[in-house]
Image (tube, rainbow, N blue to C red):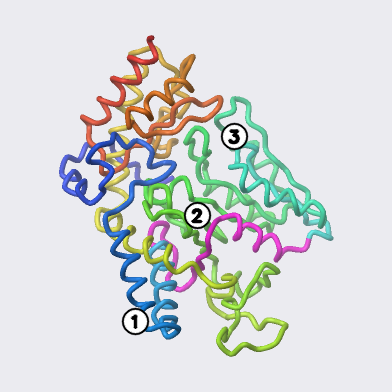
Amino acid sequence: MTATPIVPRLDPELSRWRAQYPILADTLYMNSNSMGAMHRSAPEALADYAAGWARDGVESWDHWTKVVEQTADAAARFFGGSAGNTALNQNVAYFEAAIAGCLDFSGPRRRVVMEALQFPNVIYVWERFRELGAELVLVPSDDGMTVPLERMLEAIDERTAIVPCSHAIYVSGALQDVGAICARAREVGALTMIDVYQTAGAVPIDVAAWGADMVVGGSHKWLCGGPGTAFLWTRPQLRAQLRPRNTGWFAHAQPFAFEPAPIRYADDAWRLMSGTPSIPAYCVAQRAYEPLLEVGVPRIRAHNLALCQIIIDRADAAGLTVHSPREHERRTGFVAVDFPGSEAVSKQLIAERIKHDWRPGCGLRLGPHFYNTEEEVHRTMDRVVALARR
């Protein structure tokens, strides 16, 4: 959540970026909360990667390592992370497991506290560490859409090792008060690992204001960077203390020295890398970040809030259920709209190339981005309302 609330404002000038996203030519694309539209630079980024590989062979690593660092620092700009402190890998599950493997669950401080509505991928990872002594504490929800802040804060105590929670509830888009959660964790000596996958690129984030120890996320949602590029920013003072068990040769201080085991960890962000990086994915993501950074997340947020308000107003007028929070400061970039038969309607909408996604108990998740227009949102809701009334 930001210190200065952003006022919703439709921004017609943003439509000049639409031509950079090919799918918009024949699709109502309201699914950036699940998979952002591909930027037109993606084929060129992959072609440049292939051309460099064909030309330079193994010497391409001289350039590719710079791509890793540049992409990592560009990703950090979306949450105010300091340069030189972000590692890349293929997905968030890897980073969650890498950090879990750094912790000692044999003593009294062995609790892992997170919301029960955390994305299942993350719970899967931490649940497996029960075999090593971790005590998983899933803070329950009353409504299936939100988790009371007070309940989260009460669950974090002196027995807590880490709080790997999400900035936003993935089902409903409800934002959590991460600053308060981080403050409580610091008070009892616990670490925090904040997942911004649901918000990076759509909601302004200031990791320094949060006081978080780590920020993790990925690129295929609002950042439009496609799959395969996840990031982990770590507070430098903390990173020096971490000795991940999930590791690989690119986490070595001198990976091309090919030293025998045990590993000698890098002193910088590479310490949290693993094996051979997925360079093509990073090339695509780096290019995809550029227009979003040019526009700026505050401007994206203002336009998105205005578009989402249209969805809420149209849903209310039609008597449909809105599961997402109505207060702007409590919601990320999509609105969950539900009604009897919503799953079947979802399939029909997709057949009509009205892109969105559907979740059980949640309904349609409609996530317009900066490249969407007021007219597109109305056309989308025209069809949603018409099909809901059949």
Q: Name the residue: 47% across, 36% down.
A: 173
**Badge 1: residue crowd in 10 Å (few <14, some 14–19, many ≥20):** few
Please report contact status of discs 2 and 1: CB closer than 8 Å, yes or no. no
**Badge 2: residue crowd in 10 Å (few <14, some 14–19, many ≥20):** many
Checking the image for residue 340, the label placed there is none
Query: 78 or 272, which is in the foreground?
Result: 272
Identify which amino acid the numbered label 3 is placed on: Val
Q: Nearer the viewer, mark 2 or mark 3?
A: 2
Residue 80 falls inside the magenta stretch: yes
Please report contact status of discs 3 and 1: CB closer than 8 Å, yes or no. no
Q: CA distance from mark 2 to mark 1?
A: 33 Å
**Badge 3: residue crowd in 10 Å (few <14, some 14–19, many ≥20):** many
Q: Nearer the viewer, mark 2 or mark 1?
A: 1
Question: In the rendered image, which quarter is residue 63 located in?
Answer: bottom left
Residue 39, above or below 137: below
Residue bearing the label numbered 1: 55
Question: In the rendered image, which quarter is residue 225 located in?
Answer: bottom left
Checking the image for residue 217, the label placed there is 2
Residue bearing the label numbered 3: 147
- Magenta-tinted stretch: 77-104
